[in-house]
Amino acid sequence: ESADPQKTAFLLRKRWTLYSVTPLYKFSGAHLRDYARLLSAFIAAEKQKGLAVEIGVELDIKVAVSCLPDLKGSDHDPAAILVQLLSRSSFSKNSEDKLIWSGWFCCVSGDNLLEKVPEDFTWLPLFLANGAESYTSIVGSWFQKTFDCCFRRLAISPLSLSWMAAMWTGCKVDKTPSAIELIFSVPCLPQPLDISYAIHPEDAKALWDTVQKTPGEITQEEVDVFMDCLYSHFHRHFKIHLSATRLVKVSTSIASAHCDGTIKFLQSKYLTGVLMLLTELAISQIQ
Amino acid sequence: MDETVAEYIRRTVLKIPRGEIKSMLQKWGFLSEAQLQTINFHQMKDNVSQEVVHLCEENSVDIKQAAVLDIIYNHIYPNKRMWSVYQMQKTGEEPEIFDLQSFKKKFKRRLLSALGNVTINFREYEDNAIWIRVAWGTPYTKPNQYKPSYVVYHSQTPYVFISTSVFKSNLPLLCQALVVASSYRDIREMELRSHSLNSLKDIVFKRYSQYFQTHCPRPIQDRSEEPESADLRIIRENKSEKERIQRVTREIFGDGPQPQLEFAQYKLETMFKSDPTMEVLDKKEPFRCLVKFSSPHLLESLRSLAPAGMADAPLSPLLTCITEKARNNFKIKEKKSSFPEGFVSP
């Protein structure tokens, strides 16, 4: 199922920082306006305490909380919730609100993995934020206090990155696809070394197509074979064992993901697919 | 005085680290020692630069004189720029005696006749290096002093080091002017780039020591190794293999410091070969890849890979040939020979 590209276009081409979130207690989709008001008051109070981010800038911050009904994998998924912070400069009354921070909670195809969530709890395990870290911190604190939940940065392991590389290589893209780029880091040397290994998308896809045996299904073994092929092609030329280095970033036409837990969506067609994978990672980090 | 010149001087002085401003102004020599004495170099840089500008106004500075200060700054801090290496080719005749005045005249004439609005400065240094600064304009606009190109030409060699501004369209003209002025036939880019100008010179002038000095081997005590344990039951694993790796790495990289490069890039157009039992890709066409190695000091990090266990020793010739071939940008195709592991780099 893919979401309406028009409605989700604003999510593309931004770098989102990922968090896992524990279930929210007594959260209701019917009270979004109230939450916006309360969060707004909270931010104003934090500003008074001197904890806001922009020094010397008079920002009047408006909060908008809305629902993103299209970002679901199945009907069982709770609706995704979007929080936006907008600023209106107190000097020019006629200027438009400027978006300064966004964060959204979602759960895509979580029902396969979630145990039965008790009543009174809403579980949106994946949180994505874009904007100043200090705002993320303030919004996160409010949610933690109000709904008794817990946010944690979501790290993406090299193993998960390899899955993404294999999966995304196999995806068909309408426009001219960009290269499959893998970035490896070798930090523990006297002088750190970064290796960027970019494969022509047609050639990478041709390789993956011969590795993947069952359409619609991917096994760990297939991912391992795919990566081993890439590693051994590299070794043939440079005599370096990429498997001994650390895979830190994967970039394709579909999306780009970094082990620090950031993601950039590049194709609306595959947005829910990537979110499904990230939801799975978030849930396994919590459990 | 032209306001743009004043602003240019102000901004140039602001770039200089505070402790260096006085010595750089002295090297510049445009302000007298007496004038320099009147400047308080301990105040905020903003104020220092304002004082310098006022004194320059007193001396009626023009843009060409101001540009000299920029050359001096770039000569002391060349690593702020990215340099590419070019090699000029002679016609095969007897090498002419280099005439500096003739070179400058021909160079200026070529650029001025093509563009009109350019600011050209030359400055010679002791090691036969000629620094050339060119600020580019068009027939209708004044030269942009903030995006000049720099050329370092060692007149006793065919090598030129160029740091271009963003206006890459001026590069052919620049190259043409160099060739005409130095009486060479042609110029080609060497596929060698780095921020470290001195390292580029080391590589191209072969000033590094690559080979292990067999005639004066280092005594074993010199190397910092773990002491042999007194308990004979404790032995070092793979001792002979580790020693082999050290020896082979030393043979390739030598003992001395490596020239400083920040990256090496390889465009691979070789075939994908796999274990036939794996039933994977067996195309007749190349498996196209682009590989880029980056590091603050690439060659040092490559040198440490095999000893760290991340690579085989000897390391691939694709990596170890960088200094010898004087390039860090390669296109690798499959070698059509009976030796399947060979690669050819055009």
Image (tube, coloured by chain):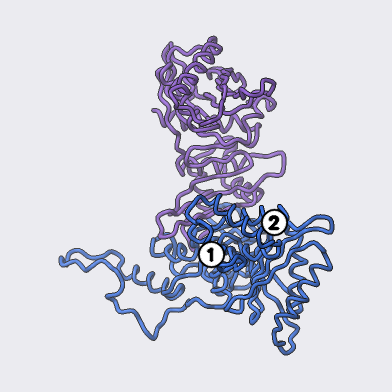
Q: Nearer the viewer, residue A122 or A242?
A: A122
Confirm whether circles 2 and 1 share one chain.
yes
Residue A233 visible, this orientation: no
The chain containing the residue under callout 2 comes to: B
Residue B315 visible, this orientation: yes
- Which label sits in the foreground, 2 or 1? 2
Q: Split into 4 quadrants, where in the image is the N terminus of chain B?
A: bottom right
Query: Which residue was labeled with disc 2?
Result: B5
Q: Nearer the viewer, residue B29 or B192?
A: B29
Q: Position of residue A46 (x, y in %)?
A: 45, 22
Give residue B114's quadrant in the image: bottom right
- The chain letter corresponding to blue is B
Q: Residue furthest left?
A: B231
Relative height, residue B29 to residue B278 (above, below): below
Alpha carbon of mark 2 to alpha carbon of mark 1: how far?
36 Å
Query: Which residue was labeled with disc 1?
Result: B261
Q: Which residue is depicted at the point 45% across and 65% down?
A: B300
- What colour do you see for chain A? purple
Badge 1: how crowded within 10 Å, few (<14), some, or many (20+)?
many
Give residue B228's quadrant in the image: bottom left
Q: Which residue is depicted at the point 52% across and 45% down?
A: A249
Callout 1 amino acid: Leu
Q: Position of residue B41 (x, y in %)?
A: 50, 57
Q: Nearer the viewer, residue A205 or B77?
A: B77
Badge 2: how crowded within 10 Å, few (<14), some, or many (20+)?
many
Q: Which residue is depicted at the point 39% across and 64% down?
A: B307
Give residue B70's quadrant in the image: bottom right
